Image (cartoon, grey):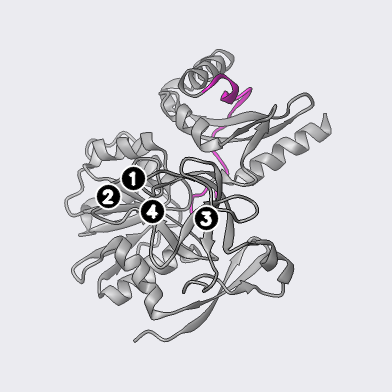
Amino acid sequence: MVPTTRACALTGNATVVTKLRPLYFGVSRKLLQLKASDVFWCLSDPGWILAVMGAVFEPWTAGSTVFIHHLPQFDPKVIVETLFKYPITQCIAAPSVYRMILQENFGSLRFPTLEHCTTGGEAMLPEEQEKWRQRTGLLVHQVYGQSETGLTCGTLRGSQVKPGSMGKAIPPFDVQVIDDEGNVLPPNTEGNLGIRIKPTKPIGLFMLYENDPVKTAKVECGDFYNTGDKVTIDEEGYIWFLGRDDDIINASGYRIGPAEVESALAEHPAVAESAVVSSPDPIRGQVVKAFIVLTPQFLSHDPDQLAKELQEHVKAVTAPYKYPRKVEFVPELPKTITGKIKRSELREKESSQMQRQ
């Protein structure tokens, strides 16, 4: 029997206080469906909430084996070699890890023992999921969670994968799309991802932000905890991530989610990776800016001409008002230790440049 324990996790400048209980460990068991014969590899440091639940507690309760590799940094060649060499049956990693592997020119990615792949931390683009399926024969199942909540949404093993979706709510969580007052919104309507906390707060949800009652009260929205993430939900209950509330771009009255623009850019062969953020503009308030890492074969192309080509591509794939008015080609994108893109750092860079002008 796993005892009830008090745990703290750092998120931003706050400390999240929660309780871990035996029933809660079953959340990830439903998601991953680990067996005693499984060898599970989480390609992340244990500071990641998904690593704690997926690489410590869940394998422990399932009796499966945890594979550990002391990688000084993410090296796609070493990761691929490891998946060929050892009998790993399941793995979980940030989308950037799968992306890095796909960008390398490997002869084969048909791993002999790998059966199931999971990703979390940020949205994985549909194009990347399809490329992984074509190269490996395996679907990537997305999951969603926060330090405050643990795992709350995901595509369960064996259930239908909708590329680009982070799956459905995982019991015991009642997940809805809500407005700023806590009213439940209809399907296919943009809103806040809310988790019902009244009349009873579900097991596993955080208790409070330690020594910060103002922040604790701020995220309580009617009967829901407001995660601060913008999403939509379809008629079947699948949830689609649009971006953090502060990631949404307000350009000339239009609200633009970065994920849609990044997904359009990913379809172009020149784009290895991209991050879309808001950039201050004296006329429109904000405009869309894309930071783009190019694929090797496009590094020698004329940057101005390529930027125009990418802008026209996004216009054609999405809508004319969503195209990135600013494009900057960069050698790499800033990321957290778990591989999540630091969009806030890119936004701050844009703001500071505007202030200097």
Report how far apart the C-alphas of labels 2 and 4 lie in the structure. 33 Å
Q: Label 2 is placed on what type of residue?
A: Glu
Seen at 34% across and 53% down, the residue is 155
Q: Residues within 10 Å of mark 4 (few under 14, many from 20)?
A: many
Please tell me which residue lies in front, 4 or 240.
240
The image shows residue 53, relative to residue 315, as above or below, that is: below
What's the mark number on residue 168?
A: 4
The image shows residue 281, relative to residue 6, as above or below, that is: above
Please tell me which residue lies in front, 80 or 126.
126
Tell us which disc is closer to us: 4 or 3: 4
What's the mark number on residue 77?
A: 1
Seen at 20% across and 72% down, the residue is 36
What's the mark number on residue 337?
A: 3
Residue 343: x %, y % from top left? 60, 43
Q: Residues within 10 Å of mark 3 (few under 14, many from 20)?
A: few
Tell us which disc is closer to us: 2 or 4: 4
Secondary structure at numbered mark 4: strand
Q: Earlier in the sequence, mark 1 or mark 3?
A: 1
